[in-house]
């Protein structure tokens, strides 16, 4: 469950951006400078993802394309083909409090094809009374898929979030189950 230590937005000499098809849609990945850590990922515009991490500064940073052989792009392609195992080896970096980072690390432990509640994630993270903090961390996650917050649900078993987000999360869960993914 790698996470790149000590990196901040100021370390970014430029952005490296790549996209791959996932579930028939464009899925983008953002990396900063020479780091291999994924800083943002998700469906939609790479510009929007970069802005979410770096704010207005993202508009000023030099942008380069990720190599087609990039490990993060390959991991997403493998996931689309039914193999989630490569996602676990990809370094990620998100700014946040130690509690939030603990929740993200815990979410990475939820096996493909399974669901866990926010309370479960909080317990795995060592903070069993912090289900709301787990929900907040999942909602703030900028490296979706690599931190599989789509597998995290309310205690009732229902998905939470905005309507579009719920549809994407359900599609990812359905894909994992249809492909027989198990950790």
Image: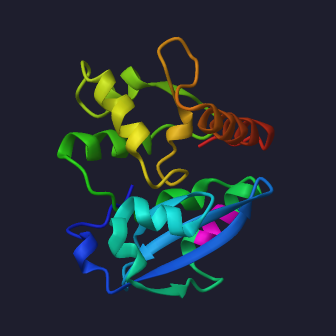
**Residue bounds of the magenta highlight:** 73-77
Work out whether residue 24 can be spotted: yes
Relative depth, front residue between 59 and 111: 59
Relative depth, front residue between 88 and 133: 133
Q: Residue at x 68, y 56 (%)?
A: 79
Asked if residue 107 lies in the magenta stretch, the reply is no
Relative depth, front residue between 142 and 92: 142
Q: Relative to 100, does residue 18 appear above or below in the rendering?
A: below
Quarter of the figure that contains the N terminus? bottom left
Percent position of residue 117, x then y: 46, 23
Q: Residue at x 28, y 47 (%)?
A: 101
Percent position of residue 169, x then y: 63, 38
State whether the magenta stretch is mostly helix, strand or loop: helix
Percent position of residue 143, x then y: 46, 55
Q: Relative to 1, does residue 159 appear above or below in the rendering?
A: above
Q: Residue at x 23, y 76 (%)?
A: 10
Percent position of residue 111, x then y: 54, 39
Residue 91 shown left or right of residue 100 in the figure: right
Quarter of the figure that contains the C terminus? top right
């Amino acid at each position: 469950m790698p996470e790149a230590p000590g990196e901040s937005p100021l370390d970014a000499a430029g952005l490296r951006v790549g996209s791959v098809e996932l579930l028939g849609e464009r899925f983008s990945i953002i990396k900063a400078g020479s780091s291999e850590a994924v800083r943002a990922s998700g469906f939609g515009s790479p510009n929007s993802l970069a802005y979410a991490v770096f704010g207005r500064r993202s508009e000023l940073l030099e942008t380069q394309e990720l190599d087609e052989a990039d490990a993060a792009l390959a991991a997403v392609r493998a996931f689309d083909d039914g193999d989630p195992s490569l996602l676990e080896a990809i370094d990620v970096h998100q700014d946040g409090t130690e509690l939030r980072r603990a929740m993200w690390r815990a979410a990475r432990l939820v096996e493909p094809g399974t669901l866990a509640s926010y309370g479960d994630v909080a317990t795995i993270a060592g903070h069993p009374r912090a289900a709301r903090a787990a929900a907040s961390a999942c909602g703030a996650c900028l490296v979706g898929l690599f931190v599989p917050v789509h597998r995290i649900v309310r205690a009732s078993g229902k998905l939470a979030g905005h309507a579009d987000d719920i549809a994407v999360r359900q599609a990812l869960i359905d894909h994992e189950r249809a492909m027989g993914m198990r950790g």
